[in-house]
């Protein structure tokens, strides 16, 4: 019990240290406005990609519709905060987004999660398109023009805190009874059923949780960028999120963090190359996939517990 | 007392009748073997009993706390929860998970920790996890696998994988354990170990075991009763002695007769 407390305290210390580090770098001037925007976008991508990793990497369900749930979060938060432009409004917006995205994921998930592999990917892609087209045609979402002048209620601090919270939720979920059941579905559905696991239920739990967390990413996007329109949440956005997951290593949360950083920084550096930017970006992706087909980190996971046990073992020797 | 009652069970795959009009029963704390030539429908019968495939006709009913319960058309996970656990002919472990996790997952419904509890890591979460861990270690130590908690299931030797699959099935605390060719691919020494293991399971867990097996030495040593299946039909039932001298069984295996 005491050991657990120690590990948790170390994680907390790491989280606080990261915050202080970014704050200090900003004060000193190493991180300028452009750098801050890059960091925020990386943070939002981490939230989106870790939640997709929960669905793809841990539950083994290949979903290509993550941008749809992001859109639901973005529009919910944008609409709520334009009425109540306060921090409280932002929190209400977040909550509305989570509920809407979770509910839609439930409705989409129950019929589609019966499908496997490619079929599921196409079905979820279709669901995301439906969401986008509805947003494109509703009056309240201002159609294709989208929403603008959304109050800027998110800064890098908000993003940082939410990255920490959502990662904590996902990691703690994965390392629990429910999370293990979810992983058993990925490993072998027939075996899981044979020991009493309701595979459909756990697939839906993972899908709904993933969607709810993606909506948080969407809300941050809306309240930081301040302008959203339906075309921001098309299939390309779903694929961008998927690229981060695959590049980092399917089933590795640490990998998702690394990949989000690598791609975010790569994107920033390549800004100077103008039209060549997308070519170089794609080339980098191809090279990584050729030389590290299982992703940058495979299924490797950073663990404070392991680090300590390793040190202890070394100390004994 | 009859624990599992199977009445006139039939499965048609298109024009092929894989299992035809099988009536059988399993009693409490009994070790029964199901034998038959390749393609006789043994595994299909297992799949029917455990709900992996749905019977065309007939009923399967299990004696539970709530009286006799008909299991037909129930989802496999419900049948498992009712007290029927199984292993598979071609081992189906959770290969990329550790030995401990494999067993823990089978205990999913035995020690419920809630969503909120696990997300916020409340003290009750650690308490329940510790209790579960304890149970897993105890169970694995019966099978001398307690030193391999952190090993990935895919890295275990073949015999150990088979054993782990049995442990995982036992972790669901079943009333009946179905073993589908547990000795397949084992050398004589491993088979002898397995024979002892199955006897041990029966005496320690007081459960009924139904066993599909081709290894006759194992079957004749272990089984109290034997059912013989050929072309989907039951052709004989009896003690090992009776089966060994049954002309229809000999014909089924060696041909000739009629």
Image (tube, grey):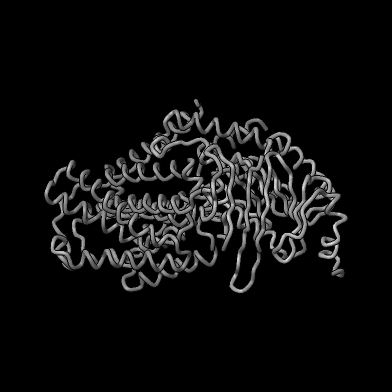
| Residue A158 appears in the figure | yes
Image-based side of A67 in relation to B235, left or right: left
In which quadrant of the rendered view does residue A140 lie? bottom left
State which quarter of the image contains the C terminus of chain B.
bottom right
Query: How far across and down, in percent of the image, does residue A314 sit?
Result: 63, 35
Q: Is residue A260 above or below residue A2?
A: below
The residue under the point 44% across, 58% down is A245
In-front residue for pair A307/A232: A232
Query: How far across and down, in percent of the image, does residue B145 sit?
Result: 70, 39
| Residue A220 appears in the figure | no
The residue under the point 42% across, 31% down is B122
Query: How far across and down, in percent of the image, does residue B89 sit?
Result: 69, 57
In-front residue for pair A274/B107: B107
In-front residue for pair B227/A85: B227
Query: How far across and down, in percent of the image, does residue A98 sit?
Result: 28, 49
State which quarter of the image contains the N terminus of chain B.
top right
Q: Is residue B1 above or below residue A128?
A: above
In-front residue for pair B158/A307: B158
Q: Residue furthest top?
A: A2
Image-based side of B5 in relation to B121, left or right: right
The residue under the point 82% across, 60% down is B249
Image-based side of A19 in relation to A140, left or right: right
Q: Is residue A38 above or below residue A270?
A: above
What number of labels is visible? Answer: 0
């Amino acid at each position: 019990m005491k050991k657990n407390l120690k590990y948790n305290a170390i994680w907390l210390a790491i989280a606080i240290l990261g915050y202080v580090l970014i704050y200090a770098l900003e004060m000193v001037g190493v991180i300028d406005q452009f750098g801050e925007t890059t960091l925020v976008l990386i943070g939002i991508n981490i939230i989106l990609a870790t939640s997709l990793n929960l669905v793809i990497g841990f539950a083994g369900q290949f979903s290509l519709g993550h941008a749809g749930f992001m859109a639901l979060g973005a529009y919910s938060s944008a609409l709520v905060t334009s009425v109540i432009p306060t921090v409280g409004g932002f929190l209400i917006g977040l909550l509305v987004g989570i509920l809407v995205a979770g509910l839609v994921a439930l409705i989409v998930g129950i019929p589609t999660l019966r499908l496997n592999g490619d079929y599921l990917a196409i079905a979820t892609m279709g669901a995301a398109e439906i969401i986008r087209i509805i947003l494109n045609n509703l009056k309240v979402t201002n159609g294709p023009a989208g929403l603008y002048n959304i109050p800027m209620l998110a800064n890098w601090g908000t993003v940082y805190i939410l990255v920490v919270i959502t990662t904590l939720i996902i990691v703690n979920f994965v390392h629990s009874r429910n999370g293990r059941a979810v992983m058993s579905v990925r490993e072998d559905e027939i075996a899981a059923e044979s020991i009493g696991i309701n595979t459909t239920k756990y697939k839906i739990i993972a899908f709904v949780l993933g969607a709810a967390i993606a909506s948080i990413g969407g809300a941050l996007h809306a309240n930081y960028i301040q302008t959203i329109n339906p075309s921001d949440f098309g299939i390309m956005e779903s694929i961008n999120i998927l690229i981060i997951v695959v590049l980092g290593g399917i089933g590795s949360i640490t990998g998702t963090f690394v990949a989000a950083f690598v791609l975010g920084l790569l994107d920033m550096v390549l800004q100077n190359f103008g039209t060549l930017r997308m070519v170089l970006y794609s080339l980098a992706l191809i090279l990584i996939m050729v030389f590290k087909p299982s992703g940058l980190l495979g299924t490797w996971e950073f663990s404070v517990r392991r680090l300590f046990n390793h040190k202890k073992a070394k100390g004994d020797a | 007392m009859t624990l599992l009652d199977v009445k006139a069970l039939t499965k048609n795959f298109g024009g092929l009748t894989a299992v035809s009009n099988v009536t059988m029963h399993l009693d409490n704390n009994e070790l029964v073997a199901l034998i038959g030539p390749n393609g006789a429908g043994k595994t299909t019968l297992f799949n029917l009993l455990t709900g992996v495939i749905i019977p065309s006709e007939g009923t399967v009913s299990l004696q539970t706390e709530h009286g006799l319960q008909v299991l037909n058309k129930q989802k496999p996970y419900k049948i498992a929860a009712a007290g029927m656990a199984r292993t598979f002919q071609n081992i189906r472990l959770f290969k990329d998970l550790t030995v401990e996790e494999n067993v823990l997952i089978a205990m999913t419904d035995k020690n419920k920790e809630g969503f909120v509890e696990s997300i916020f890591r409340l003290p009750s979460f650690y308490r329940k996890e510790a209790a579960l861990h304890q149970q897993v270690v105890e169970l694995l130590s019966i099978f001398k696998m307690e030193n391999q908690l952190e090993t990935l299931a895919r890295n275990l030797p073949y015999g150990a994988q088979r054993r782990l699959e049995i442990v995982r099935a036992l972790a669901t605390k079943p009333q009946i354990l179905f073993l589908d060719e547990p000795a397949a691919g084992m050398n004589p020494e491993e088979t002898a170990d397995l024979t002892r293991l199955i006897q041990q399971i029966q005496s320690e867990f007081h459960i009924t075991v139904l066993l599909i097996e081709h290894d006759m030495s194992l079957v004749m040593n272990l089984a109290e009763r034997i059912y013989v299946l050929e072309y989907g039909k039951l052709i004989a039932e009896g003690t090992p002695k009776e089966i060994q001298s049954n002309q229809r069984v000999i014909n089924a295996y060696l041909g000739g007769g009629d």
